[in-house]
Image: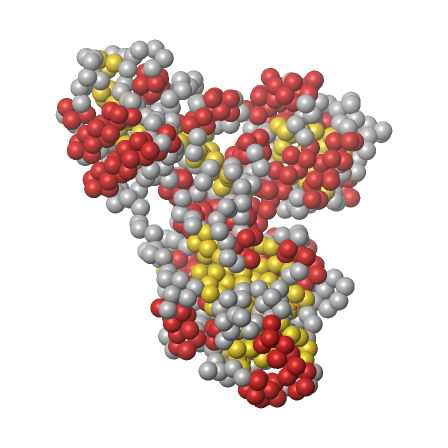
């Protein structure tokens, strides 16, 4: 049998199946047949036929069964050709002598055919593939493998030594987006080679599309278990897959949903009543610690100590069993020996308790018996729809609910904005005690063996809790990684998520069949998952809390220009180096501010940035310098290097500056030996780092986070536009959000508007200045939406109009609206269309009302507002004010 029909050309557009799927019936059948026949390995020709069916270019997949057929196929393909062995037993063809390249004539082809037949005479062979020779290109590899937790992963890398020796590859969890595809290519160390370092750049767009097609192919065909395109040749125009193999199998059943119980975890964190099973007042007992913590921190709800031997515990009436408690109980803590815990949990279920925190240990972590007990408990709680945290954990702390369930006795905790999920109890005990000097937590949840509630559940909850603005996670393993990526991606748009994941080096010890699988060590996968979801990965505990302190105490920088103030040149240099490595830079002060700096410093000080005040640095000087920086446009954050021995005298001054939302962090070399004042500075809201590098890195991470978040929000707003093209007077017009690259277009637009139009829009004379261009093109998507209409002449775009919705900070749910249309495009319904789209966006963004104000003489504008159903609100001598109710 000769499979397939043609050798394909590069760059074929995807052939789509009838129901919009990537694969047509025939190539899909190859997969199903193999699965039915229990064959897992798909040979090159089969794999390539599937790829071609998905619109992916290959060197061809024709198979010859006889010498005559081989020669005929060679003629059909055209010389030179490549011949390769087709055998289910030969996975690595060239190692076995099964690849003959560059055959120039029928004569050479015949000789090669006979030689190959001879080499494989003792093996089962199906035939020989005849394919065209691919022109030399840059060798790359794309692969897919599967991870038990994250599901299918896609890998990209350069071929040859890059992948084999340097392991220079990038991974993503499937399915990927266009942005992921671009980042995968960008991420490999050799990416400059693709961009034309020493030669012509490869066709990055078709490479991105190829990655997306592979992603879609595997997503739509879960039978594809693994896949390697190795090599793939990349060209300045297009690519071709030279070799391919796949492994298929019956798809795994999708993972069952989590517990059947309460969906929202709200009551786990804000229970109105708590029973403590195993509460005690015998000093030193864990049950005493837990109960004492609840009492001493002033838990505001009802407490029910459960202890069969006591009338009262710490003066609170006790019960023999939770079943004896007369009122409903929201949450129960179980802190009795493992043997008794099972019955206690069953009692909780019978009582109808929805959340049980099992702090008792001795379960799955301690061997077979414990594992079995844990499995029995799981069955019981699933039946009752009760949710369990733990076992083997240290409970929950919620300072906003005065609730401390920790096993370790804890002193005062301030109410903070940090939410922490930890797979180790120590984060709710010893570590927390230390950290509470410099960091204020809102919620801490320890998850222990995570029999039911896991890190992702808590992450999801914390991302919705308004008391929490930074999320910290300590994890040893990730349950259902695919869901983690999904939840973390959404969480990271709302607030920073910083993760410490231990167990990084151990590569999976699984038996691997594909090249890709051998490269997908556990940690590669974790890193890919974190990157893909926008989670920030910390190296160690020190780094974790260094970043957490920055994010929880300081705003995110709005630009990457940094002012470095120091008393010693060396630390200024250290900060500078790291700033540039972290995507930041030294701010360039405008000449006016440079003069002011000179005036603020003694003659011998260096006023260039870093500003070196020398050892004579005083608090007053630092204050002046920061105040100058606050006013400068290019300065968006500060690193202040201070002397440890006089640190105390800087605390009040640092606190007294109005930073106007620009972050500041401090550096104190050897701070650990001068910790008293460091703690004071931290409590004043300024993170203090031991090294200038750490300070620079923290600012870099914050800035990168802000950019990513802003882009994600902008993308989601852009996706909500229902109309992005229209025709006005037969001219095609495009609608889109304004962005920072539009400064030129914006300036041209303002310059093209008549003074009258500008007056009507801005209510005063208005002209384009660089500062205004910056301000109007760099919108903060959380506070403002700016929609532009543009038309193209030749390859030049031109703005025709701009509409803006600006959140009214003084009135919840209200946005202010304004629009300006270029003079020659007025009265052509463009203003109405722009306004309708803005109104749609405002609705989807959750605004309740839109207000607009305009001059009475602005008839055109008033007409637009009327057409969009705005209501007349009121007027004074000059102005008309109108509102539109959206709810
Ligand atoms: P295997 O990986 O099973 O050993 P390949 O099909 O990848 O076999 O062939 C080995 C090498 O031969 C490839 O890495 C590539 O460099 C070269 N090669 C194979 N087929 C072609 C072709 N059609 N055109 C150009 N080079 C080829
Ligand atoms: Mg190969």
Tell me where residue 28 appears, x and y as whole percent: 41, 73
Q: How many marks?
A: 0
Tell me where residue 631 appears, x and y as whole percent: 67, 40
- Which corner quadrant of the image does residue 656 belong to? top right
Tell me where residue 855 appears, x and y as whole percent: 50, 60
827, 122: nearer the viewer: 122
Identify the residue at horizontal 73%, vertical 39% (top origin).
576
Above or below for 489 versus 860: above
Tell me where residue 594 appears, x and y as whole percent: 77, 39
Identify the residue at horizontal 37%, vertical 40% (top origin).
454
| Colour scheme | secondary structure
Above or below for 366 versus 35: above
Q: Quadrant of the C terminus?
A: bottom left
Identify the residue at horizontal 43%, vertical 54% (top origin).
151
Identify the residue at horizontal 44%, vertical 30% (top origin).
424
Above or below for 218 versus 775: below
Left or right of residue 605: residue 726:
left
Note whether residue 376 is visible: yes
- Which corner quadrant of the image does residue 296 belong to? top left
Q: Residue furthest front?
A: 122
92, 3: nearer the viewer: 92
Note whether residue 650 is visible: no
């Amino acid at each position: 049998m000769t499979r397939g029909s043609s050798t394909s050309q590069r760059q074929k557009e995807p052939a789509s199946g009838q129901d919009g799927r990537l694969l047509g019936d025939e190539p899909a059948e190859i997969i199903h047949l193999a699965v039915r026949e229990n064959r897992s390995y798909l040979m090159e020709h089969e794999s390539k036929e599937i790829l071609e069916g998905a619109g992916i270019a290959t060197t061809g997949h024709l198979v010859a069964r006889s010498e005559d057929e081989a020669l005929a196929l060679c003629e059909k393909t055209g010389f030179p050709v490549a011949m390769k062995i087709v055998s289910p037993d030969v996975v690595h063809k060239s190692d076995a002598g099964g690849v003959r390249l560059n055959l120039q004539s029928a004569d050479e082809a015949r000789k090669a055919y006979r030689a190959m037949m001879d080499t494989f005479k003792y093996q089962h062979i199906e035939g020989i593939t005849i394919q065209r020779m691919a022109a030399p290109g840059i060798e790359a590899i794309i692969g897919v493998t599967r991870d038990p937790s994250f599901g299918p992963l896609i890998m990209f890398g350069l071929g040859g030594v890059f992948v084999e020796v340097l392991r220079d590859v990038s991974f993503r969890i499937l399915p990927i987006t266009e942005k992921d595809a671009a980042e995968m290519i960008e991420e490999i160390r050799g990416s400059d080679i693709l961009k034309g370092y020493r030669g012509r750049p490869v066709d990055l767009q078709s490479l991105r599309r190829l990655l997306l097609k592979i992603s879609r192919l595997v997503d739509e065909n879960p039978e594809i278990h693994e896949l390697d395109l190795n090599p793939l040749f990349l060209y300045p125009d297009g690519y071709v897959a030279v070799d391919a193999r796949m492994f298929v199998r019956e798809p795994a059943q999708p993972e069952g949903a989590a517990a059947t119980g309460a969906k929202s975890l709200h009551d786990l964190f804000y229970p109105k009543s708590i029973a403590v099973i195993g509460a005690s007042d015998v000093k030193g007992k864990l049950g005493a610690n837990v109960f004492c913590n609840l009492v001493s921190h002033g838990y505001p709800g009802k407490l029910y100590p459960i202890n069969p031997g006591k009338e009262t515990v710490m003066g609170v009436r006790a019960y023999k069993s939770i079943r004896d408690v007369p009122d409903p109980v929201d949450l129960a803590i179980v802190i009795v020996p493992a043997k008794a815990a099972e019955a206690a949990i069953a009692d909780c279920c019978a009582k109808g308790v929805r959340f049980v925190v099992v702090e008792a240990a001795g379960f799955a972590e301690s061997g077979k018996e414990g594992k079995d007990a844990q499995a029995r408990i799981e069955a019981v709680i699933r039946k009752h729809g009760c949710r369990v945290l733990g076992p083997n954990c240290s409970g929950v702390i919620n300072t906003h609910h005065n609730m401390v369930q920790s096993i370790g006795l804890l002193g005062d905790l301030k109410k903070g904005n940090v939410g922490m999920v930890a797979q180790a109890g120590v984060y709710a005990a010893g570590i927390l005690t230390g950290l509470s000097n410099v960091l204020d937590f809102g919620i801490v949840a320890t998850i222990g063996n995570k029999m039911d509630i896991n890190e992702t559940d808590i992450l999801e909850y914390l991302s919705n809790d308004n008391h929490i603005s930074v999320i910290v996670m300590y994890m040893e393993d990730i349950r259902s990684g695919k869901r983690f990526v999904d939840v973390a991606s959404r969480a990271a748009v709302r607030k920073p998520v910083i993760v410490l994941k231990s167990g990084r080096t151990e590569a999976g010890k699984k038996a691997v069949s594909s090249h890709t699988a051998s490269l997908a060590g556990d940690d590669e996968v974790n890193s890919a998952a974190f990157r893909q979801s926008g989670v920030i990965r910390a190296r160690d505990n020190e780094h974790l809390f260094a970043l957490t302190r920055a994010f929880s105490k300081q705003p995110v920088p709005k630009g990457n220009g940094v002012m470095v103030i120091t008393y010693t040149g060396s630390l200024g240099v250290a900060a500078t180096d790291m700033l540039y490595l972290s995507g930041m830079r030294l701010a360039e002060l405008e000449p006016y501010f440079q003069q002011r700096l000179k005036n603020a410093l003694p003659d011998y000080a260096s006023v260039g940035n870093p500003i070196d005040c020398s050892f004579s640095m005083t608090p007053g000087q630092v204050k002046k310098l920061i105040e100058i920086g606050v006013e400068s446009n290019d300065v968006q954050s500060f690193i202040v290097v201070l002397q440890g021995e006089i640190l105390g005298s800087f605390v009040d001054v640092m606190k007294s500056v109005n930073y106007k939302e620009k972050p500041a962090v401090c550096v104190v070399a050897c701070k650990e030996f001068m910790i008293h004042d460091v703690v004071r500075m931290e409590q004043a809201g300024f993170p203090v780092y031991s090294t200038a590098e750490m300070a620079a890195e923290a600012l870099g991470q914050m800035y990168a986070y802000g950019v990513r978040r802003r882009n994600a929000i902008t993308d989601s707003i852009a996706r909500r536009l229902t109309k992005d093209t229209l025709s006005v007077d037969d001219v095609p017009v495009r609608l889109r959000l304004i962005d920072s690259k539009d400064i030129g277009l914006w300036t041209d637009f303002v310059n093209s508007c008549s003074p009258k139009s500008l007056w009507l829009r801005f209510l005063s004379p208005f002209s384009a200045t660089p500062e205004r261009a910056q301000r109007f093109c760099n919108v903060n998507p959380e506070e403002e939406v700016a929609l532009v209409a543009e038309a193209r002449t030749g390859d030049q775009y031109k703005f025709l109009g701009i509409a803006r919705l600006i959140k009214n900070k003084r009135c919840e749910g209200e946005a202010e609206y304004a629009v300006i249309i270029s003079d020659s495009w007025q009265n052509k319904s463009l203003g109405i269309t722009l306004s309708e789209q803005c109104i749609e966006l405002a609705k989807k963004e959750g605004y309740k009302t839109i207000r607009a104000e305009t001059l009475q003489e602005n008839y055109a504008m008033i007409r637009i507002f009327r057409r969009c159903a705005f209501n007349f609100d009121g007027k004074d001598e000059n102005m008309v004010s109108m509102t539109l109710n959206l709810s």
